[in-house]
Image (spheres, helix red, strand yellow):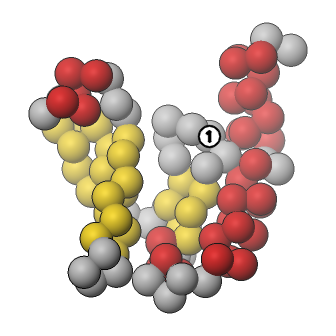
Amino acid sequence: MIYERAGVIEYIAWQVNCPTLRWNRLNDGRYVEVKEDRPGQIRSSALPGLWLPISVFAERDLHRVFADITEGVASIEHHRFMTTILGT
């Protein structure tokens, strides 16, 4: 798969015909679907602080989506990750 060759650690697939979000993570050389880390939410291991409420995507509840993203970006995990990128 092209994602594996490119070194993609995680990717999200959105199925429009039956609104479903599938989160996939590279594990031992193969992509496996990631299940919820917390009830209704998946937290990225590739981008600490990227938290998405899986269940509400189908409902198109953008307020909840943005609330979870905002909470993740405010997390200590995200701030630690940003220091590795920014060097501060």
**Picture residue at 27% right of the left edge, 56% below the top:** 33
* Residue 82 in view, yes or no: yes
Q: Quadrant of residue 62?
A: bottom right
Seen in the picture, residue 31 relative to 3 is either above or below; the reply is: below
Which residue occupies the extreme left position in the image? 1
Disc 1 designates what residue? 48
The one nearer the camera, 34 or 7, is 7
The one nearer the camera, 76 or 22, is 22
Check the picture and name the quadrant holding the N terminus. Answer: top left
**Picture residue at 25% right of the left edge, 81% below the top:** 17
Q: Position of residue 22 (x, y in %)?
A: 32, 63
Query: Is 82 placed left or right of 3 in the picture?
Result: right
Q: Position of residue 5 (x, y in %)?
A: 21, 21
Which residue occupies the extreme front position in the image? 17
SS at mark 1? loop
Seen in the picture, residue 12 relative to 67 is either above or below; the reply is: above
Which amino acid is tagged 1? Pro
**Picture residue at 28% right of the left edge, 70% below the top:** 15
Seen in the picture, residue 65 relative to 26 is either above or below; the reply is: below
Query: 10 Å neighbourhood of mark 1: few (<14), some, or many (≥20)?
Result: some
